[in-house]
Amino acid sequence: MADDAPRFAPSPVSPAVLDRLKAAVGPGGWSDDPDRLAPKLVEWRDRWRGTTPLLLLPKTVDEVAAIIRLCAETRTPITPQGGNTGLVGGQIPEGEVLLSLEKMNRIRAVDAEDDVLVAEAGVTLAAAHEAAGAAGRFFPLSLASEGSCTIGGLISTNAGGTAVLRYGTMRALALGIEAVLPNGDIHRGLKRLRKDNTGYDLKQLLIGAEGTLGVVTAASLKLFPILADRTTAVAAVRAPKDAIALLGLAKTESGGAVEAFELMGRQGVDFALKNLPGVRDPLAQPSPWIVLIELAGAEPGQTGAGMERLLAKALEDDLIQDAAVAQNDAQAKAFWALREGQSAAQKPEGSAWKHDVATPVSRIAAFIAEATAAVTAFAPGVRVVAFGHVGDGNIHFDVLRPADGDDAAHAALRDQGARIVHDIAMKHEGSISAEHGLGTMKSIEALRYKTPEDVAAMRAIRAALDPHRIMNPRVLF
Ligand SMILES: Cc1cc2nc3c(=O)[nH]c(=O)nc-3n(C[C@H](O)[C@H](O)[C@H](O)COP(=O)(O)OP(=O)(O)OC[C@H]3O[C@@H](n4cnc5c(N)ncnc54)[C@H](O)[C@@H]3O)c2cc1C
């Protein structure tokens, strides 16, 4: 098979197989009602629209196992879906049976002694935060889609978000996983151990597998103490290189209390001010770049003093030109609304090429400068919105059509634009997918950047676990 050939052409699932799948979950465990299916067949940005002959809604791991066993036996392709907030199209079926985890939404345990939360795959991130908080603990993963994205999706995409700098991605936060493997076997790996050196770590294979190696049905997750002392600030910087210097200063001046360090470019801020109701610029003068810094600590007053020291030193060194420190929760939320609205604010502006890249932190400024120059030379008039979790080297580099441009004409250049941006990220020893995964959007593109040896090893693992490629067949290699 050529690497750039279409890799999956769905053949219709027979009515007999559909009947057996329905019987496996019983009444209430499936739907083929177009109205019920509709929201699950379109992606958040409206870029992918899919089809499915059947939506399955299992309530237990045994029901999931029965479904997958049947799919393996009949070689029926199946796509798992959580909250449908993924940004690379992997959760949208194109003819496959659709397996939603929405009914597996129980918190199975919260244990403050072990510092563990055990949640089923369909639990939303917001519900996990709430359950941890009720037990006097903190689950640190934080993303703008937290009201909808689910533990299963977060595990399967190895989600990142705003607190990776301090706590790591989902890979660092999962202690154990329960999953149904592509032959229907159940991996009962809901351990609560910090140490377990007993051979290959199956959970790490499933984390970031985007539904290709099985269905995650539950996970045990690490909890942390609540750091009640928080200070949030925004600062004006002239250029990304100053933001990176500020990050270094923040790490030392705050005594290791930096929890989030986010960057926003002027274009994205202006879109947010124009397109999102209630969003305000927290700084008195428009700044070319804005940094959002959050410090968190245990001692009352610790982070306020740390932030003051940091901002005073940064002003003195001319790294920042202005700053605003949130005086209460409402102000902190308003700062975050500006940052978290960066994607939504682009929607009314027309077609965009979206890139979720990472580079070493030390290369971010060079990447932004080179990528901006290259896409502007390639497509004059495009509007670049660069923002993201620069504290961990992740930048969302979005390229919108010219203000008076045509959506279709801009969309037609998307693949060439991606090639330009990705080549520059890779030149800086980066990644073409920092946190969203490959999905259907980037799986073929990624073959250009992975070594043939790594692709062969990944294909061998997949073929060993899923010889008939029933699990999310259009995703990955
Ligand atoms: C406004 C917004 C902000 C975002 N910010 C961030 C961010 O800061 N950081 C970040 O990392 N992501 C971010 N995302 C992307 C998205 O929220 C994450 O990728 C999230 O992890 C997806 O979870 P989900 O439950 O919606 O999964 P879905 O979108 O339903 O699925 C995503 C992928 O996981 C697979 N999958 C889902 N559930 C399972 C399961 N139980 N078992 C096996 N496979 C499964 C699907 O097949 C698909 O390939 C953002 C999205 C939005 C809309």
Image (cartoon, rainbow, N blue to C red):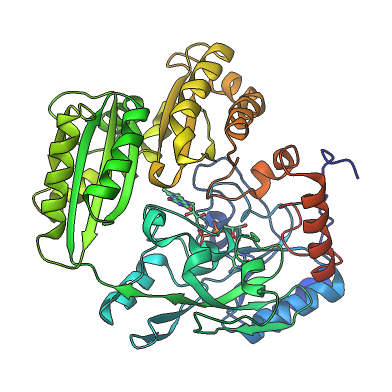
Q: Residue at x 59, y 23 (%)?
A: 408
Q: Residue at x 8, y 50 (%)?
A: 327
Q: Position of residue 383 (x, y in %)?
A: 44, 21
Q: Is residue 26 left or right of residue 129?
A: right
- Nearer to us in this view, 78 or 27: 78
- Nearer to us in this view, 361 or 4: 361
Residue 281 visible, this angle: no
Q: How many marks?
A: 0
Question: In the rendered image of this protein, does residue 26 appear above or below residue 445?
Answer: below
In the rendered view of the protein, which quadrant contains the N terminus? Answer: top right
Q: Residue at x 46, y 22 (%)?
A: 369
Q: Position of residue 338 (x, y in %)?
A: 27, 40
Question: In the rendered image of this protein, does residue 341 appear above or below residue 208?
Answer: above
Quadrant in the rendering for residue 24:
bottom right
Q: Residue at x 65, y 42 (%)?
A: 441
Q: Is residue 346 left or right of residue 309?
A: right
Residue found farthest to the right: 1
